[in-house]
Amino acid sequence: MTTTVFATVGYAESWWIQILKSLIIFIVGFSLVPVALMMDRKLLGRFQNRRGPNRVGPYGALQPMADIFKLITKEQFRPRTSTGFLFALAPAISVLTASATFAIIPFGNVVDIFGAKVGLYGIDVSIGILFAFAFSAISFYGLMLGGWASGSRYSFLGAMRSAAQLISYEVSMGLSLLGVIMTAGTLSLTGIVTAQGGMWYFIPQLCGFIIFMTASFAETNRPPFDLPEADAELVGGYNTEYGGGRFASYYAAEYFNMVIVSALAATMFFGGWLMPFGIHPPSWVDPFVVLGKTIIVMGFFVWIRATLPRLRYDQLMSLGWKVLLPLATLNALVTAILVVVTH
Amino acid sequence: MAPWNPGDDAIVVQRAPEPGGAAGFYRAFGETLRGLKTTFGAVVEGTHTYNYPEEKVPVYPRFRGRHKLHRFEDSQLEKCVGCSLCAAACPADCIRVVAAENDPEHRVSAGERYAAVYEINLSRCIFCGYCEVACPFDAITMGHDYEMSDYNRADLVFTKEMLLAEPLERTPLRTETE
């Protein structure tokens, strides 16, 4: 008789620790959203010789709060042709899946807090990265339902564009991580981080890293792959009919996804909570190391946004299917051969 | 059937060599890196913006801002003699002058007459500077003040007293080297 092992934990966490740490992780994750928003606008300004928003609060630090407050105090409205229930549900799905994915990001190893063993992550699932991909697959429903339930042609076409783009790039994103998974020999994210003790994976897996980053720009609808929005060309994509708090939810989910993808990149390729050059700080520093790395990767997202112009739709598709997918497959194949040969 | 021959009409278009292999990789990757370098250069370069309400953009000496009426420095008499040439020259028809005879006991201007009413409707003014050119006594000139927005249209009609007074905040003037 076989038993299915969902998560292998060598210790038991009491229920209140689990609730407490999930709350903390959720709060930290969600407060990274305004940080991402602010970084996006401030850094983008610097990249364009501007200062960015600097009116609200010190150095404009309260600007995202003002934006969010403005959006959530606006009237909730929906088109007469929309399906009310789904129209309200869709942005919630986007936010929910984004915050669920954040649960597996490891901020540190198992530590002793007042005698209780606590893992500094929401949950260490043995299927690790597959969990993230499962939720990012569900998050398509947020966009698709939102566009479809709006009962508007623009939204519907925008949703179709988004779905086509996200599905195309999900494939190469998954394949690009295969090399990392094979080298580490585990799917668990904490396992992958501890396996990077010798060398961070962005050096041996440089090809995979580049593919992962390219695909994650597309996955998070960031420029140069922001075709679902394409604010200079289209009416607005899947969120055309949204306004107020629901639009804010979509917006927050988008930035949350950017945070998550940055955190994933930091975990998979930049050694998570590990420090370079053999520095071993005390374990309370680990979460800050992860946050710092995440913010650096987020800065790279903004840098790319400031640099590259938006792709044409056919270029987007041919890059995804003709360049990234074969490259990712080749990367996985070569890694597999090397792993077999060297072991 | 022989393949169609376009003959001499065919134009051969000059094309750059098709990228392939290493060249294609360079185009995709090297050029992206070059772009990243360019944008990072902008960060190093710093900002080129003025924090407007705190820092004002300096104007050139010949900048045509809000009008000023002038007095003679020694006698403090108004230079304007109420001839209405400025009003005649104004293409936007925004100047209104009503002239009156000077009282020899209490002279207002140096000439025979003076402007009893002198109004410029700044919401109509196009800042062309023709009034300045038309004035035979250099009584009206264009100043450097450019902050003239207001909440009421009526407040934009500047009277003689307002035009004679110095602006509250001086607009910075560009130095020679700027």
Image: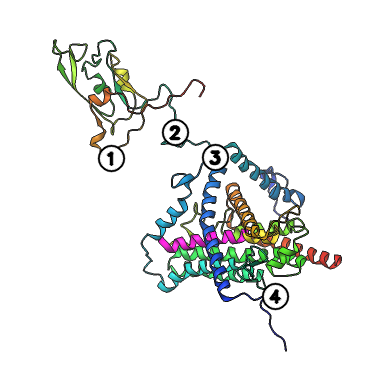
Residue A199 is one of the magenta-drawn residues:
no
Q: Is residue B79 left or right of residue A44?
A: left
Q: Mark 1 packing: few (<14 Cα in 10 Å), some, or many (20+)?
A: few
Subunit ID for the residue under disc 3:
A
The disc label shown at residue B151, or none = 1
Q: Mark 2 packing: few (<14 Cα in 10 Å), some, or many (20+)?
A: few
Which mark sits nearer the N-terminus, 1 or 2?
2
Q: Nearer the viewer, residue B85 or A55?
A: A55
Subunit ID for the residue under disc 1:
B
Badges 4 and 2, same chain: no
Badges 3 and 2, same chain: no
Badges 1 and 3, same chain: no
Q: Disc 4 to disc 2, how far (Cα)?
A: 62 Å
Q: Disc 1 to disc 3, how far (Cα)?
A: 33 Å
Q: Which residue is mark 4?
A: A10
The disc label shown at residue B55, or none = 2
Q: Amino acid at mark 1?
A: Tyr
Q: Amino acid at mark 4?
A: Gly
Q: What residue span does the magenta drawing correspond to?
A: A244-262
Q: In the current view of this chain or complex, which residue is farthest to the bottom?
A: A1
Mark 4 lies on a secondary structure that is loop
The disc label shown at residue A202, or none = none
Q: Nearer the viewer, mark 4 or mark 3?
A: 4
- The coloring applied to the image is rainbow
